[in-house]
Image: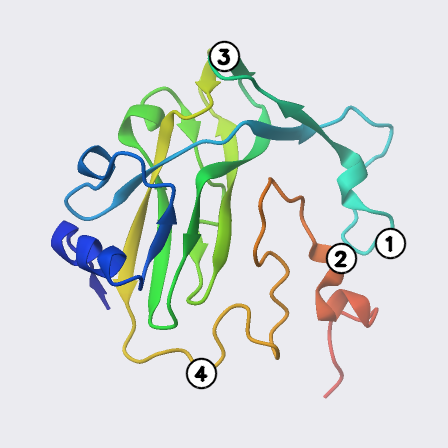
Amino acid sequence: MAILSDKDIKEHIELGKIVIEPLSEPERQIQPSSVDLRIGNEFKSFRLIRKPFIDPMDKSDIEGYMESFYIDEGEPFIIHPGEFALATTYETVELPDNLVARVEGRSSMGRLGITMHVTAGYIDPGFCGKITLEISNIGKMPVALYTGQRVCQIVFETMTSPAERPYGHPDRDSKYMNQKRPVTSKIKHDYELIRGSILTKD
């Protein structure tokens, strides 16, 4: 795999191979080997509920564990130490079948103790939608986040060949395709949990 440079990123965008909409300030957002992305205006955080744990095999909707907050421009969303929240990028991103992408937190955010993705920083070829951000505050002070603030960066890598079944392919279980807002976990739709047995017998 090879990481796209700023020159390659611009060419891919001009040819429509990579879509980032809206890319309001390309000269500021396109970095030497990445593109800065901004945070949207909807956040989700966990409610305080009387359940001992989250069970991925529970048939109830995990959406009920979380509540949404819409933040007006110029108003802060405060994330406290130890808190976890979902948000999305302001931009919609679309990848071709021969590129993968990684979302990385900006150094300036990391130095405040804010991580922008817990584990899901990998974007499959063929993905289209806003990117869900899994935000945690691992520092000791609350931090304010503002709609439109640059909080992460996306890096593009070429594959050895185009994917035969990219994300969104009819034969794939692409649960988060075309998402437009923070989407809670759809883990209950995983095939191994649906069938009710995690391990298959030999």
Give the amino acid type for the residue marked by disc 3 in the picture: Pro
Confirm or deny contact between disc 2 and disc 3 (CB under 8 A).
no
Of pointers 3 and 4, the one earlier in the residue sequence: 3
Q: Which residue is mark 4?
A: 164
Of pointers 2 and 4, the one earlier in the residue sequence: 4
Q: Along the horizontal axis of the image, is 82 left or right of 59?
A: left
Tell us which disc is closer to us: 1 or 4: 4
Marks 2/3: CA–CA distance: 32 Å
Q: Is residue 80 visible?
A: no
Confirm or deny contact between disc 1 and disc 2 (CB under 8 A).
yes
Of pointers 1 and 2, the one earlier in the residue sequence: 1
State the image coordinates of residue 137 (x, y, percent, origin top left).
49, 24
Of pointers 2 and 3, the one earlier in the residue sequence: 3
At label 4, counting other C-alpha atoms closer than 10 Å, the crowd grade (few under 14, some 14-19, many 20 or more) is few
Of pointers 1 and 4, the one earlier in the residue sequence: 1
Give the amino acid type for the residue marked by disc 1 in the picture: Lys
Q: Which residue is mark 2?
A: 188
Marks 1/4: CA–CA distance: 32 Å
Disc on res. 142: 3
Q: Residue at x 21, y 55 (%)?
A: 9
- Decide: is 83 above or below 168: above
At label 1, counting other C-alpha atoms closer than 10 Å, the crowd grade (few under 14, some 14-19, many 20 or more) is few
